[in-house]
Amino acid sequence: MNDDNNPLKDRRTRRDVLRQGILTVTGAVGFAAVLEALSRSPSTPSSPVPRPTRPVAAVPGDPVSAWEDITGYNNYYEFGLEKTDPARLAGQLVTEPWTVTIDGMVQKPLTLDIATLMKRFPPEDRTYRMRCVEGWSKVVPWWGIPLGQVIKAANPTSGARYVKFTALADPEVMPGVRAGVLDFPYIEGLRMDEAMHPLTLLAVGIDGQPLPKQNGAPLRLVVPWKYGFKNIKAIVKITLQAEQPTTTWSTIAPNEYGFYANVNPEVDHPRWSQATERRLGELGRRETLMFNGYAREVQDLYAGMDLRRFF
């Protein structure tokens, strides 16, 4: 086909511009983060998010982050490119009713609403560090269900080696989807042993309360030893399959966002050193820990792997 007649030509050009825009915006985060830390004031959510009242358990040596940072500073490109866009725009998202389907290479496919999911698999408190590939971090008191419990209930077949997660993509209420800043729906994936690891969580809340919409309500993934972009929000489908899923970020920039996305201070992102990080609310930087401080729990999953090749 003559390229001048190719209907995908304009789309590719537009996508290239959008892609460069995303990379430029995220590349400016380091400087922006300094300004934000110096002059930070809580964002104004489109709908007020109640502050938890019960005490929360902290990660040893790490206090839980400020509520304003947990709910007001997020990457959620379905709602825009700025960190405050989700808190400002996610209020229009309808999260009830909501179902999640577990299908693919399973003997007992499941479709559950959130209330049934929580009744069948009572949520647990898990306070985890969260590390963004852009070099900032926070500590979040999640409330969620071990993903492995849900997968086991669907009876995986012996051929299931990977888990693919699919998020909601509703252009009516998600302005980022309308803008086409990425190929939506957002897709992420894990190996089966990563998905079955006891640290891996399907979060339904924070500190015992339902997830705020800007944090991925009503159901999101939390894998604490991986960079934040692996933690897909607003999950509607979990599919077990034999092949490694093609994920959103590894499609748009495969040299920057690997499938594994394990926090690794020895392997830099092309635009951000991963040796240190800035905890939200702090001006200085702290050393980043291998596997985000969870090496003892998860390093055996990657024994013998070249972690520079499989980044």
Image (cartoon, rainbow, N blue to C red):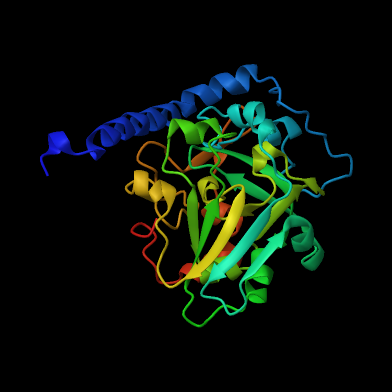
| Residue 87 vs residue 125, the one in the foreground | 87
**Residue occupying image coordinates x 74% and y 62%:** 117
Task: Name which quarter of the figure residue 116 lies in.
Answer: bottom right
Q: Is residue 253 above or below residue 237?
A: above
Write down the quadrant of residue 155 in the picture. Answer: bottom right
- In the image, residue 55 sits, relative to residue 82, either above or below, namely below
Rendered residue at 59%/27% (across/down): 85
User: Image quadrant for the N terminus?
Assistant: top left
Question: Could you say where residue 149 lies in the image, as x and y percent from the top left?
Answer: 69, 71
Q: Residue furthest top?
A: 39
268 lies above or below 100? above
Q: Residue at x 78, y 46 (%)?
A: 210
Q: Position of residue 246 (x, y in %)?
A: 39, 57
Taking the spot 60% from the left edge, 66% from the top edge, the residue there is 102
The quarter of the rendered structure image containing the C terminus is bottom left
Left or right: where does residue 282 sit relative to residue 159?
Answer: right
Q: Residue furthest bottom?
A: 158
